[in-house]
Image (spheres, rainbow, N blue to C red):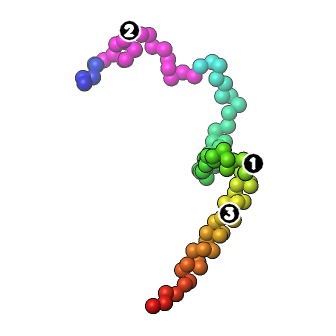
Amino acid sequence: MKKAKGKSIFARRGARDTGLDDILPQYDFSGGVRGKYAARYREGTNVVLLEPDVAQRFPDAASANRALRVLAEVADGAKRKTRSRRRTA
């Protein structure tokens, strides 16, 4: 595909330059704070969607986290037990 020379895409299509880079007047960022959520963004987030039946058992994030921590401890304990077994021949 060849590039058109000289004119912008608006001029080639016969449209006037609409100033797409300008902020529209209804958007007011005068009270905005630069980087307000930057630290939270850097920390990262891990969003998990629960199936409806599971979500009924855990009404909030704290209860889901508590249950997952207990499950993780049980899983870690099971790993330790399987590693410490000796094989007998």
Quarter holding residue 17: top left
Q: Which residue is mark 3?
A: 69
Q: CA distance from mark 3 to mark 2?
A: 62 Å
Q: Main secondary structure of the magenta part?
A: loop
Region in magenta: 6-23
Q: Secondary structure at mark 1?
A: loop
Mark 3 lies on a secondary structure that is: helix
Query: What amino acid is at disc 1?
Result: Pro
The quarter of the displayed image where residue 37 is located? top right
- Percent position (x, y) of residue 88? 49, 90
- Image quarter hosting the N terminus: top left
- Observer-side mark, 1 or 2, equals 1
User: Residue at 63% of width from left, 46% of height from top?
Assistant: 51
Q: Counting residues from the N terminus, which is met first, the one under dot 3 or under dot 1? A: 1
Please say if 51 is above or below 70: above
Q: Which mark is residue 14?
A: 2
Residue 77 lies in the magenta-colored region: no
> Gap in Å between the C-alphas at discs 1 and 2?
57 Å
Q: Dot 1 corresponds to which residue?
A: 59
Magenta stretch encompasses residue 10? yes
Give the number of the mark in front: 3 or 2: 3
User: Which element type, helix, strand or loop, lies under badge 2?
Assistant: loop
Residue at the outermost left position:
2
